[in-house]
Image (cartoon, rainbow, N blue to C red):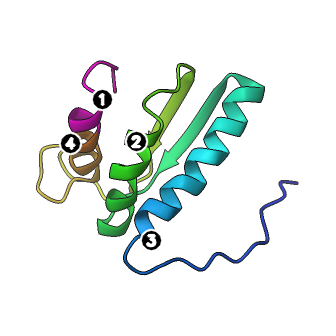
């Protein structure tokens, strides 16, 4: 059984996305320091995409295996305006042009 952190985090309303990104960054760095790879399931939506723009920028220096999986309950074309893949992929393209994203 997995143990999840029980801490309650109170965030400043103006920097909440950056603060959540830092928490995610710490967890990913702990995992890759021990396991050498990390699997991350990404949801989408306006709040999540805002967090990812900080998070993906923060982890771009990690030279380990990072696997990203997209969780999306909707079935729309990847180029559709409502596509979560499109939203997240645009962040990868802006932040990390040198690494592949499939």
Q: Say which quadrant the C terminus sits in.
A: top left
Real-space CA distance between mark 1 and mark 4, rounded to the nearest whole angstrom = 10 Å
Q: In the drawing, does residue 48 fall left or right of residue 2?
A: left
Residue 56, label in figure: 2
**CA–CA distance in space, label 4 to label 3:** 21 Å
Answer with mark 1 or mark 4, whichever residue precedes in sequence: 4
Q: The magenta stretch spans which residues?
A: 92-102
Residue at the spot of label 1: 96
Q: Earlier in the sequence, mark 3 or mark 2?
A: 3
Of marks 4 and 2, which one's residue comes earlier in the chain? 2
**What percent of the width, then of the height, locates residue 6?**
79, 71
Lower position in the chain sequence, tag 3 or tag 1: 3
Q: Please, what secondary structure does the residue beneath circle 1 have?
A: loop
- Helix, strand or loop at disc 2? helix
Residue found at x 52% / y 46%: 41
Contact, mark 1 vs mark 2 (Cβ under 8 Å) = yes
Where does residue 67 sit, x and y in percent of width and height? 51, 30
- For label 3, the residue is 16
Q: Tell whether 38 sits left or right of 55.
A: right
Q: In this view, does 45 lie above or below 52?
A: below
Q: Report the residue at 44% width, 48% height from top.
A: 55
Magenta span has 95? yes
Task: Note whether residue 73 is visible.
Answer: no
92 displayed left or right of 78 = right
């Amino acid at each position: 059984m997995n143990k999840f952190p029980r801490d309650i985090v109170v965030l400043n309303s103006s920097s909440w996305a950056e603060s959540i990104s830092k928490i995610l960054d710490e967890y990913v760095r702990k995992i890759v320091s021990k396991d050498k790879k990390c699997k991350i399931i990404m949801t989408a939506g306006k709040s999540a995409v805002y967090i990812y723009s900080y998070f993906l920028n923060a982890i771009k220096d990690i030279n380990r295996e990072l696997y990203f999986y997209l969780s999306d309950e909707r079935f729309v074309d990847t180029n559709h305006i409502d596509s979560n893949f499109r939203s997240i992929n645009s962040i990868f393209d802006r932040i990390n042009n040198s690494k592949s994203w499939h």
